[in-house]
Image (cartoon, grey):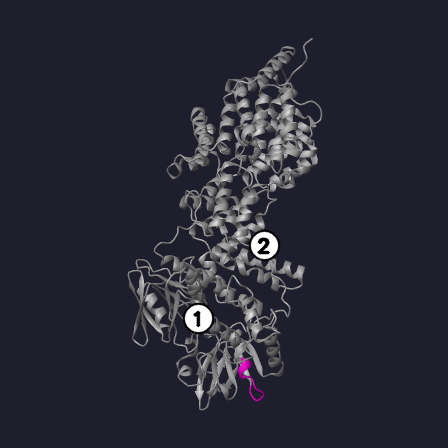
Amino acid sequence: MRRVAVVGAGAAGALTAVQLMRQADRLGRAVGVWLIDPGGRTGPGVAYGTSDPRHLLNVPAGRMSASPDDPGHFLRWLAERDPDAAAGDFVPRQVYGEYLTDLVERTADACTHARLHRVRDEVVAVRGQGAKAVLRLAGRGEIRVDAAVLALGSLAPAQDWAGAALRESGRFVADPWAPGALGGPAGEGDVLLVGTGLTMVDVAGTLARADRVVYAVSRHGLLPQEHLPVAAPPAEAPPELDGSLGLDVLRRNVRRHLSATRRACGDWRPALDGLRPVTAALWQQLPVADRVRFLQEDLRVWEVHRHRMAPATAAMLRGLLASGRLRTGAGQLVGAVPVGDAVEVALSDGTRLRVSAVVNCTGAPAGPPGTVNPLVRCLLERGYGRTGPAGLGLDTAGDGRLLPAAGAPALRLWTVGAARRGNLLETTAVPEIRAQAAEVAGNVLETLTDRRPPAPADRYGQRLSTSPEAAELYDRALERILAGRLGAEELLGQAVAVDPGFAVGHAALALLGHERGGAGPAPGALTRARRAAAVRADDRERGFVAAVDACLTGTEERGKAALLGHIAAHPRDALAVSAAVPTVSFNGVTGAEEAWALVEGLSAAYGDDWWYLGQLAFVRQEQQRWEEAEALSCRALAAQPSAGHAVHARAHVYYETGEHRAGLAWLDEWLRRHGAGAGHRSHVSWHAALHELSLDDRPALLRRYHRELAACQVSGGRLLADSAALLWRARMTGSWSGDLPVAELLHAAPQHWLAAPATGFAALHGALALAAAGDLDALARLRAHALAHQQPVFALVIAPLCGALSAVVREDWQEAVRLLRPLLPLVARTGASKAQQEVVEETLLHALIASGAYDRAAHLLAARLDRRPSPLDRRRLDSVRERRARWRGPAVVSGATQYTRSA
């Protein structure tokens, strides 16, 4: 039998013990659970141990189930005792304590494989025995266990502010929740409560009488806000919330979210409730220095709004304040002198009071240093644990396991609840604790299992924190993404439906939605990915979610740095690599030579993998290493005939080497066999159309367009990048007669590609489509957008291109030539392939010929023919030479080159 200790029998310990017993029983594993706590009762702890019925839960009953997979459990339990109980009720905390006690007892009775051992003692020290733990008890005994979960609750309130004279006077209540603490001096005359949070509210309710005044002070003097009588549903957190941008930006965006929700819903509370699922992720994104600033500048304001009073409690508080029995204010205790049967206290605002007792309502200290808890001190002194980020709690891994100090051994120690504040910030309420308890229990049992099944992983061995069914759906989706096949988003949707907490599944959906033109599920999926990663994910998965987040919501530089940093740490994360490299599937974050270096550097990680060979083949063709590219693409296609990147690479090889007839035949055969499921069928058809254009086969080009590239056959950004770009090229080469059917493409295309494109690639093809439509006003608006854009490529390439295309539409040929010539070496910065970049050269050729600059046009065409044979270019060169022969040579007139007709 495996032995697991749970140290602490309050709510966190009780829920963890229940999960350990249930999961062990479900798996049929013999596990002994030692629940260790000196308290006389199991479950209530400090939070729910009060006997005062005026102390209410500050969360409605409907959200207080102890089980994360059974949200109605507490409400059903409550209804057995009170048939009138409703989900919106704020019930007494002692009732919830009884529920936890009953839950532990019923679970222990029901389990056959797990055994509960209740030890009423205090753990004061721990030492390692290998990875196991030996727990020393205050009663001098020891318990040896295979693993332990520390459910210590909040540390005892700090007392150093009170001064030695007050602490030793007998009139200082160090912990108001200690048994009998509010009797004796605290129950006599006037009393001072130091702290104005939820603890103060409860203590004031207990102590208030008509014949006494309860004073309450804190540094801020802020009182908790109250819940609405009928709660509104949470408002989803906006995607622009991002802690990595720093505290000041996050603070502004949160305030905007609150204001927008108040305008929409009439109240700020739904906005704050909607932040709950993403709070941990935002906290982890903040730099440590900003976390410290938050604790100093914002924590108190956050807490009074986040942790609210029940409506009945708020009404009680208002009554006490109105009657004068409770008086609150901002201030600090600066002096306290015991005098006979009272204490004379001085406050920082000059106020002096004579009270029978001073009660410590300051709440838990920020961090463990200086704590009086002997077990926490032992953990820190021996290095089994270390202080958490920003000085809060204990530092933990994502699964709740305690992180040791540098050089210290790592024991099998986990923690739940308040000790994880440094990593999660929000971790003391039942909705957070019940999820942690279930996750930690599963991790403990998995660690202690000798023959545990391997965790689900993708095809490259990357672990997936999800169920086997969701992992299998994700892996099928990943294969389709890598092959450039349709259906990946549907499979990912099924995966996250099976497991809504599958962080990588949501992040992949967000990434694909963004790449498909921004019209997909990107914003919602990204929010869900952030939430899921904060609850259940390993380092690799959290890194992937953070990289996708940075790429979709951050600056170009931040997105690039995040993605490349993630790939450096996890080179076999193929989806991340795909997103980094510009291809027919992804815009990428790297330029040409950066992408080459990235792909070439991954050879050891992927070897002969068909997807990697296709990526490397594309790199080789861009480097004009045609034979190598051909060989690599053939190897990839032999392993996976539908491999999209390999097909794309081979299509470029055929085109760039001038093998137009062979390339056309091969592409048509591939389209016949595999085109139906190709995610970028239209782009392969575009490549086939380029061969027909180069062969000067106009009828075939027209048939291809109407059969495979018309608006009814294509969707998304490909309407512009493939269909509209082909129409413009056909017009520039004189290969299309009559009006261009571009209006139907513009109507169906993503409108932001035309009005406010996010990438240079989208802007390039949006501009070409607008030129094909002859829309000068839209080109002017796109140029203005480019000039204001933060990415350099917009001002460098897109703005002058819009001007040049406008000149072509106006038939101002000399202006068009002047603007187009400098763009030829720069257009590669848009991420377009060499074949796509040629459209700018085709436009320049058209302008040169139209302006009568036949020598320059002939020179450009001859250079193209030297690079690649083409019947189209041969015909155009012959035509240009024939025109030039009918014109006299150039005569210099006033410094300008002029051409005149010969007689």
**Position in image of residue 301 (x %, y %):** 54, 67
**Quadrant in which residue 861 is drawn:** top right
Name the residue tied to disc 2: 238
**Position in image of residue 717 (x %, y %):** 60, 37
Mark pair 2, 1: CA separation? 46 Å
Q: Is residue 218 magenta?
A: no
Please report the residue visible at 44 percent of the width from the left and 45 percent of the height from the top.
Answer: 458
Asked whether residue 761 is in view, the answer is yes
Q: Locate the N terminus and report the quarter of the image it occupies.
A: bottom left
Please report the residue visible at 67 percent of the width from the left and 10 percent of the height from the top.
Answer: 902
Please report the residue visible at 41 percent of the width from the left and 85 percent of the height from the top.
Answer: 169
- Decide if residue 147 is on the left or right side of residue 633: left
Judge by depth and name the residue closer to the eye, 747 or 504.
504
- Decide if residue 1 is on the left or right side of residue 235: left
Res. 879 mark: none
Please report the residue visible at 46 percent of the width from the left and 75 percent of the height from the top.
Answer: 46
Judge by depth and name the residue closer to the eye, 747 or 81.
81
Please state which of the two labelled residues, at mark 2 or mark 1, is closer to the viewer: 1
Rendered view: 409 above or below 883: below
Q: Is residue 207 magenta?
A: yes
* Kind of residue sitting beneath label 2: Pro
Name the residue tied to disc 1: 109
- Decide if residue 507 is on the left or right side of residue 143: right
Q: Over which residues does the magenta segment extend? A: 204-212
Residue located farthest toward the front when viewing the structure as drawn: 112
**Position in image of residue 762 (x %, y %):** 59, 37
Rendered view: 155 above or below 769: below
* Kind of residue sitting beneath label 1: Asp
